[in-house]
Image (tube, helix red, strand yellow):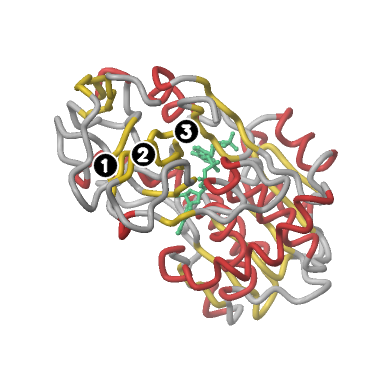
Amino acid sequence: MTGTTARFVHQVSRPDGFPMREDFAFVEEPVPAPAPGEALVENLYLSVDPYMRELMDGGWDLHTPLEGRSVGRVAVSRAPGLEEGALVFHRRGWRTHALVTPGDVRVLPSHRGVPAHTYLGLLGGTGLTAYVALTRTVRLQPGESVFISAAAGGVGSAAGQLARLMGAGRVIGSAGSPAKVRRLTEEWGFDAAFDYHDGPVGDLLGKAAPDGIDVYLDNVGGDHLEGAIQGLREFGRIAWIGAIAQYHNSAQPPAAPRNLYDIVEKSLRLEGVLVRNHRDAQGELEEFLVPHLRSGRVADVQTMSHGFDSVVDAFLGMLGGANTGKMLVRVAAE
Ligand code: NAP
């Protein structure tokens, strides 16, 4: 049975540049009782995501419980169809307990050997983003060379492993530390990797892929996008997934890429990816990935932070590169 105190995180100020702990506050209330048609969910895992940094500039109201992706267990139900004990995904995160209606949640399937938190990572929006970027946006073909930025993060590590399974030729990743670069090649099947602090991305990519690349999955934007445009062969494709290099300065136009017109000169295709437009691929993702997860061919890479108290630090840490794989917070024991 659930405890008596529910805890929430509020945003209390708008950041100027990189956010700080002081931009958040922890708030407590008695655990709410569900009304007819509602269920009380006890959150087990919370996801902290880069898009939340953008929400901090105005998308989130101040002094209000924040929202984010979470997996939890139904503790008390007055909602037909939501059984007590069911494992559910919902978007009312940044809190220990949430009141939900059946329309707010997805009851999670039970795949033997797949832990609950995987539904916030490889089998959640993170894995789905990587999967649809490869299968629907760039339509990766066997033998093609792929470059992935923020490659040691959640989307990046998923994308590299998926690209390998889909028959990619050379898979190249960039990341922010020598330790991450090593893991890319030694553990997750990348053929080459570099630390983007070591020089201009275009030069580093040129060394890692001397024959050029066919496909770029962009998680970073700015100088990474510029370097990838430089390295792409004629008729190459870019799936633009995110621009984490720009999220702290969204009011200013980015200094890069300065070579956008090469998209014309090389007949490149650049297309944005928004995972919410591809929810219909969830079943396909599970069918494809679950056997590979069970066999251990795909690593469910995550950095797990422990305790609700750690959620703000986990979020700030992820923005600063403290994570390898998906950054998650374990709020309560399963
Ligand atoms: P993540 O990659 O697990 O974590 C963010 C990583 O970004 C950090 O670990 C850090 O790694 C890197 N980073 C931070 N500042 C950077 C900078 N200035 N230059 C280069 N790298 C930097 O996060 P994620 O959840 O998987 O998301 C990755 C990207 O995908 C983000 O841009 C996110 O917004 C986007 N996304 C988009 C969708 C969509 O639907 N379009 C869905 C999910 C995610 P390093 O140590 O390597 O710097």
The residue closer to the viewer here, 331 or 252, is 331
Badge 2 element: strand
Q: Are marks 1 and 3 in contact (CB under 8 Å)?
A: no
Q: Nearer the viewer, mark 2 or mark 3?
A: 2
243 left or right of 298 in image = left
Which residue is under mark 3? 44
* Label 1 beta carbon less than 8 Å to ligand 1: no
* Label 2 beta carbon less than 8 Å to ligand 1: no
Q: Which residue is drawn at 35% across and 48% down?
A: 91
Q: Distance between the residues labelled 2 and 3?
A: 9 Å
Which residue is under mark 2? 41
Give the class, few, some or many, for how many residues have Cα within 10 Å of label 1's Cα (few <14, many ≥20): some
- In the figure, 101 relative to 284: above or below? above
Q: Which residue is drawn at 65% across and 75% down?
A: 236
Q: Can residue 54 be seen in this view?
A: no
Q: Do the residues labelled 1 and 2 touch (CB within 8 Å)?
A: yes
Q: Which residue is drawn at 52% across and 20% down?
A: 306
Spot occupied by residue 259 in the image (x, y as percentages of width and height): 50, 64
Which residue is under mark 1? 99
- In the figure, 165 relative to 4: above or below? below
Badge 1 element: strand
At label 3, which amino acid type do we have? Answer: Leu
The part of the image, by quadrant, that contains residue 185 is: top right
Image quadrant holding the N terminus, namely: top left
- In the figure, 42 relative to 146: above or below? above
* Label 3 beta carbon less than 8 Å to ligand 1: no
299 left or right of 257 in image = right
The part of the image, by quadrant, that contains residue 68 is: top left
Spot occupied by residue 125 in the image (x, y as percentages of width and height): 50, 55
191 left or right of 234 in image = right
Q: How far apart are marks 1 and 3 (CA)?
A: 14 Å
